Amino acid sequence: NAGKNSISVVIAGGGSTYTPEIILMLLANLDRLPLRCIKLYDNDGERQGKLASAVKILIEERDPSIEFVATTDPKIAYTDVDFCLAHIRVGQLPMRELDEKIPLKYGVVGQETCGPGGLAYGLRSIPGVIENIDYMEKYSPNCWMLNYSNPAAIVAEACRRLRPHSRVINICDMPIGLEDSFARILGFKSRKQLDYRYFGLNHFGWYTSVKDPDGNELLPKLVEHELKYGNTMPGESMDDYTDHTWYDTALKVKDIVSLDPSMAPNSYLQYYLFPDDMVAHSDPQYTRANMVMDGREKRVFGECARIAEAGTAEGTSLRIGIHAEFIVDLATALAFNTHERMLLIVPNNGAIENFDPKAMVEIPCIVGKDGYEPLSIGTIPTFQKGLMYEQVCVEKLVVDAYEQHSYLKMLQAMSLSKTVPSANVAKKILDELIVANEGYWPELH
Ligand code: NAD
Ligand code: LMR
């Protein structure tokens, strides 16, 4: 693979629970994205170290010609790289736990990217992502950053405002999960057999068209199914899903789609349209962060320790991140000018005609060597536009709060969020989040 077109990548947030599955995905796609070097970079060397020995073995066993580096030194990490795959979590999972639990104390949605917890995470993430962009520009000015650090919508707005000329593309794997469900519902083997039209913000949008390879519109058939079963299949139960939250989410699509049966919604809209149901179904003592720490984190770190101990990855239970395939698709499109159509989070700039040109929107784009070209969406209906405008203003206010160190802007963001019932509640949650985020947030005044 050490040919002249072969590529060097750095994974920022090397200690992420997703790192091993991304590595396996890269190793499974060397025929279309040949690699000469894979680096892991994290600012927590101890955490990254727990995965690095196993990753080294995975790479050596697949292709020993690929150089492997794990480092906490930004200069080593970012020198001579073509792509940075960024999935950092500033504050790690214990801070996610607080993001989820503090709002729930006040009866408000406690979620990683939605509601006050998502806004708190946004204020933490911005400096971490910007810091990584600056390292990239300093040491490898031609590198592209494919950034899927959450909360993607706020992070993307911060990139637009603070680093407008940087080679950063913000992406999300949520649409891949939805499109997998659509393919299953419509009887196709792969989401890639279908063509989609979609508009919205990250974790906040709608599919307006799903076409088969002959160009036939299947959206009405999809919506008919969703109105009956959501995104579950008839006869399915909780046991068919990794855990009950994913089953509940797939089922809840039934309620979301009934608000506008002309489009297939992103399931994250459940948090904005049915916050009362979401809170009623949450355990304020045991949230998604706890599930991830007791589940994915233990499993991934445990298996990496086993591989390191055994000195081989033979018979490993680690699996390729199927969702992560879109990262290879995107890198391949940029490296080899494939002109693939992909959903990206980009400045609206007129693509949605009746929406803020300076909003970061999630829309289909054609991707090639020079970056992306967004497709034109046209006008969107009042219901969707109203929801999106409220939410995009919340996201913009968080970036204002970051830039101006403004308590008032953060309070306005929390008060405007559709998930928060009153400014009284917003203030109580904000004041608690400020204490919890000491050392991560700028000092607000
Ligand atoms: P994790 O806590 O397991 O790992 C994140 C790593 O980032 C940690 O090792 C941490 O030390 C590191 N980190 C934090 N700040 C950093 C900095 N400034 N520089 C370098 N490294 C830093 O988190 P996870 O659950 O694996 O998730 C990782 C990220 O990916 C999160 O932001 C998550 O929300 C996001 N994610 C996004 C998608 C998507 O498609 N958009 C899908 C899944 C996960
Ligand atoms: C995460 O990064 O952990 C979430 O996006 C998905 C989950 O497992 O809650």
Image (tube, helix red, strand yellow):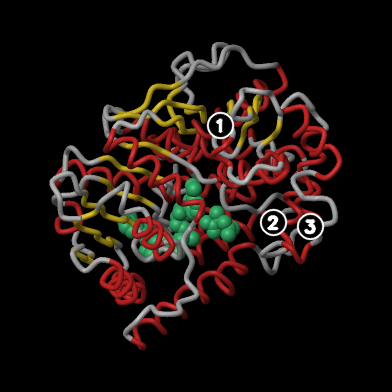
Number of numbered discs present?
3
What secondary structure is found at the residue carrying circle 3? Answer: loop
Q: Nearer the viewer, mark 2 or mark 3?
A: 2
What secondary structure is found at the residue carrying circle 1? Answer: strand
Q: Amino acid at mark 3?
A: His
Q: Name the residue carrying label 3.
A: 281
Please report contact status of discs 2 and 1: CB closer than 8 Å, yes or no. Answer: no
Residue 292 in percent (x, y) is at: 57, 67
Q: Quadrant of residue 421?
A: top right
390 and 41: which is toward the camera: 41
- Disc 1 under 8 Å from ligand 1? The reply is no
Position above or below: 154 against 431? above
Mark positioned earlier in the residue sequence (2 or 3) = 2
31 and 48: which is toward the camera: 31
Q: Quadrant of ligand 2?
A: bottom right
Mark positioned earlier in the residue sequence (1 or 3) = 1
Label 3 environment density (alpha carbons within 10 Å; few <14, some 14–19, many ≥20): few
Q: Name the residue carrying label 1.
A: 201
Q: For the point 45% across and 40% down, which residue is it? A: 171
Residue 119 in percent (x, y) is at: 54, 44
Q: Amino acid at mark 2?
A: Trp
Q: Amino acid at mark 1?
A: Leu
